[in-house]
Amino acid sequence: MFDRRHFLRISTLAASAGAAKSVAGTPTSTSAAPSPARLGDGAPGRIIHMVADGTSLGTWSCGDQLARLETGRGLAWFELWRRPEAYTCLMDMRSLDSLVTDSAAASSSWGSGSRVRNGVLNVSSTGKPLIPLMALFGEAGWRRGLVTTTEITHATPAGFTVAVDSRGEGETIAKKYLERKLDVFLGGARDHFDPTKRKDKRDLWIQFAAAGYYVAKTKAEFEKAPDDRPWLGTFTSGHLPYSIDQARDKNLQATVPTLREMTDRALAHLERHDHFLLQIEGGRVDHACHNNDAAGALRDLLAFDEALVRVLEFRRQHPDTLVVVTTDHGNANLGLNGIGTSYRDSSHSFRHVARVRASFPEILKRLKAAPSESEAKEILAESTGYKVSSRKLAQFLPFLSGRGTTLFDQMNSDVAALGQLLANHLGIGFVGTTHTSDYVPVAAIGPGADRFRGLIRNVDVFRIFTDLARIDYRNPEERLLADTPANPRAENHAAYAVA
């Protein structure tokens, strides 16, 4: 139902945001939406939006096959697709200026209901800040939280929360988080809060604490977090470690919580509230795919699936919860190839994935320090189980010093070369090192899930969520811009490729 008083209040908020260069925060003195108690029958009291960042359909498929190989049970995500009460669809994720989106434009399309240029967060092409979901839901009285394995200031969580001119403004995003006043912030990006690392020397840890937040920098501190205060958890200087590395590093296990552990604590913290919006991101699948690191990507996808298991357990206890599980774009399109006569060697090759013990950054660090060809062979055999031939190794080694060449320029990197080398062993190949234009799969269960069917647009997520919460506000949409060959705000995929 249209609420004129609510519309006037939210319009005032929009005008205030538009007067500034970027949205600074949401006023807390007014209520911008009907109270949760006025929600209609059948509307969700809780909304959990889960994102396995950069997960192509082939990555989902191989993740399911690896889970079955190791545990005899497939991904909970595919089990959700089989449930008769769940709804599924495909979603067009293009950005305002390209068929291929970056994570900032992707999350902004959900967060504001408007397509924006790649590289920006909830800012129109004319520089007008848009009002994101976390601001609107906060005004409506909902509790809110962000959980991620990336920097907490990274594109996907930020796209639900703030408006800034560039996704790279992590220090600015951290400052805006303080103004946004969410209940839960859990992830990496310690450096964006640390006065010794910030350019402005502001101590955001002290400022968050002064605002009532419990601040945790380690897993041990996080485990002591009280339920009567909001949380800020920043557990690493940058992104959280790859799951494949954390699994063999006892120090990382002791100091950094997993996505499942963060999800479990966040749900327990928010459970006592009848209404909350929570975004949960498994972000390092995307980074591993940029690196053409099949085992790294699949391990992080399995870690994401463990968090999904916990979320579905929560939904069984709280049937008024809407759970939406998706990805923001494809990336490099990981896929198991047909190997051998009649492809009968594919299954055997795929079994080798289970023997890989380290991420590509860790493997490459060791390879670049190897003094000899024989030691390089030992490193590959120890880390991946691959006994590489001298001929294959000779083709690969020039890439370690930037002297390798390929016909497809995008694959001219050490990570892409390592991915191609291991494809002989794992059977898994990639089409590139960057995002792809795939329509992405979505699965939803709970009140309102029936709106996720057929082929939808990314911007529809904002409209579904706000409609279900009875929030009568729309950001302005723009007509799609002609694709251009270069965009100074676009995501730097080369940086991911060597990270």
Image (cartoon, rainbow, N blue to C red):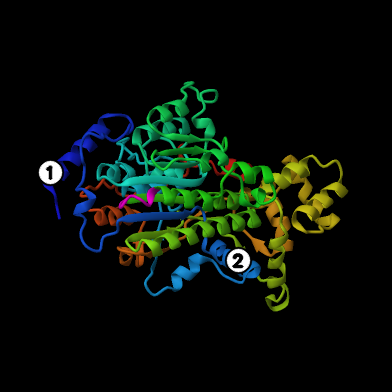
Give the quadrant of residue 228.
Answer: top left
Quadrant for residue 26, please give it: top left
Specify whether residue 274 is painted magenta: yes
The answer to whether residue 97 of the structure is visible from this angle is no
> In front: 165, or 244?
244
Q: Residue at x 25, y 42 (%)?
A: 139
User: Which of 326/120 is in front?
Assistant: 326
**Sequence-earlier tag: 1 or 2:** 1
Report the magenta residues as a range. Answer: 270-275
| Vertical arrangement, residue 115 with respect to residue 196, above or below | below
Is the residue 409 above or below the residue 438 in the image?
Answer: above
Q: Which residue is mark 2?
A: 67
> Quadrant of the image for the N terminus?
bottom left
Look at 69% across and 56% down and name the residue there: 420
Position in image of residue 431 (x %, y %):
59, 58
Could you say which quadrant of the image residue 494 lies in? Answer: top right
Q: Are marks 1 and 2 in contact (CB under 8 Å)?
A: no
Q: How many marks?
A: 2
Percent coordinates x, y for residue 404 in the rendering? 73, 46
Q: 26 left or right of 363?
A: left
Q: Main secondary structure of the magenta part?
A: loop
User: What residue would you read off at disc 1?
Assistant: 5
Question: Does the magenta segment cover residue 47?
Answer: no
Q: CA distance from mark 1 to mark 2?
A: 52 Å
- Residue type highlighted by circle 2: Ala
